[in-house]
Amino acid sequence: MSNASVPRDRDNDYTTAMAEARRQFVRERTGTALTHVGQTSIDPALLPGNIEHFAGVAQVPLGIAGPLRMQGEHAQGDIYVPMATTEGTLVASYNRGMRLAREAGGITATVIDDAMQRAPIFVFENARYARDFGHWVSTHFEQIRAQAQATTRSGQLRDIEQYAQGKMRWLRFNYTTGDAAGQNMVSKATREACQWILAQKPPGLEHFSLAANFDTDKKHSQVNTLHTRGKRVVAEVTLPAALIRDIMHTSAEALHRQRQLSNMGAMMAASVNNGSHFANGITALFIACGQDVANVAESSAGMVYGELKDNGDYYFSITIPSLIVATYGGGTGLPTQRECLEMMDCYGSGKVLRLAEIVAGVVLCGELSLSAAIVSDQWVSSHDRYGRNRP
C-alpha cells in the first residue's frame, strides 16, 4: 500500500483546487468518492487557522428549537436555538422542555464566575524550597501579572492558585479572556510570565513545565467543579404543578422522587454529573455555533437540584461549573457558525455571557424534558417514534 503523503501546496494550500486534489487523492487510494464532502459553500481562503489539509465538510443536520424564554442578566426574551445533531428526538425533546419553561415565565440564568487557566509546574530539590517559592510568588504577583498581560489585549490575570505535592508546586493561573474561549491566549500569557519567573532563578529549582495536567484541558476534574473553568453558570425555573401535569403528563412529586433516585445513582457511579444528558444540548449547540467541541468533555459536567415547594410547585436548577464558550475567534467566524450565533444575537464582542446563559437555559430544558419522559414512561416510545432511522 502506498504511503504517499496527503497533497499540500506550501505556497497556497487553501484553494478549491487543493481541496479537490485531496478528494481525488482519497478516491485513488481508497476507492471512495467524497461527493457529499465536496459540496460546500465555504471559501477555503477563510480557513487558515481552523483546519489543515482541507478537503470539504462533514455536514450535520441542524434543527431549530424554541422559543427559549430567558430572564437572564445578558440573555432576555424569546430566543430560537440552532441544534446540530444526528440523534432523533433530541430537538423535539428540548423543544418540549422550552415550552414548559416558557409557559412557566422563563428561565433565570446567572453567570457567577469566569476563569480560564494554565497550570505550570515547578519542581524543586525539596519541599522547603517549593514552599518558599510559593511565598515568593504571592509577594511578586503584580510583577508576574504585568508580564502575563503584556502578551494580550483582552486577557486579564485574575489570581494564581497554588497546589503543592512533595517537592512540586503547581501554579494555577486564572484569567478572564473576554469573548474568546482563551486556551491559547492563556498559554502564551502564562509562558511569558513563567519565563520571567525562571529568569529570577528561584532557589532550588530543578525542573519546569508549562503544563502538567493540573489545568485539565479537554477533560473534567474536581478542581474545575470547585473552582470554575470557563464560565460557571446557573439556570433555574419554578414550574407550576398544573403545567407539569398538562405538558409533561406527570407531577412535581414524581419528578422530585426521581431526582432523589438519580442523585443516588450518580453518587454510586461516582459520576461528574447527577443530571441526565447535559452533553446532548451542549454538543448540538457547540457544533452549530463553531465552538471547540472537545470542550464538551469539561462543559458537560454539572449539578442538578430540585425542590418541591409547599404549594406543589417544583423549583429546578442546573449548574455548569466549567462551560467553555466563545463568540469571537476559533470557528465562530465561519459562515454557517456565524449565522447560528447571529440568530441568537451571540456573535462578536460583548456577547459571550449571553451565550453562556443561553446554553445553560437549553441544558435545563433538556433535563426537564428527559426526566419527565422517564417518569411518565414516554422515553422508549418517543425514541421508537422519532429516533429510529431504518427502512
Image: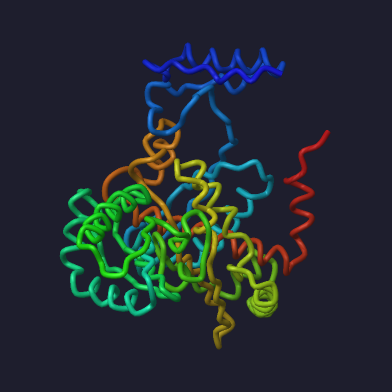
Instruction: Identify which residue, 112 or 362, lies in the foreground.
Output: 112
Q: Residue furthest right?
A: 391
Q: How many marks?
A: 0
- Residue 351 higher or lower than 132, as above or below: above
The x, y position of residue 225, in whole percent, is: 48, 70
On-image quarter of the C terminus: top right
Q: Residue at x 75, y 60 (%)?
A: 378
Q: Nearer the viewer, residue 17 or 354?
A: 17
The residue closer to the viewer here, 322 or 194, is 194
Camera-side residue of 185 and 56:
185
Q: Is residue 244 left or right of residue 177?
A: right
How far across and down, in percent of the image, does residue 47 sit? 40, 28
For the N terminus, which image quadrant?
Answer: top right
Left or right, 191 with respect to 306, comes to: left
Question: Measured from the top left, where is residue 325 in percent x and y?
Answer: 41, 52
**In the rendered image, is residue 265 in sight?**
yes
State whether residue 106 appears in this view. Answer: no
Q: Residue 157: x, y in percent?
A: 25, 61
Residue 372's place in the image compared with 92, above or below, is: below
What's the residue at 63%, 18% (across, down)? 26
- Residue beneath the point at 29% across and 59% down: 176
Residue 305 position by quadrant:
bottom right
Q: Residue at x 35, y 55 (%)?
A: 354
Q: How is the image coloured?
A: rainbow
The image quadrant that residue 4 belongs to is top right
Picture quadrant of residue 96:
bottom right
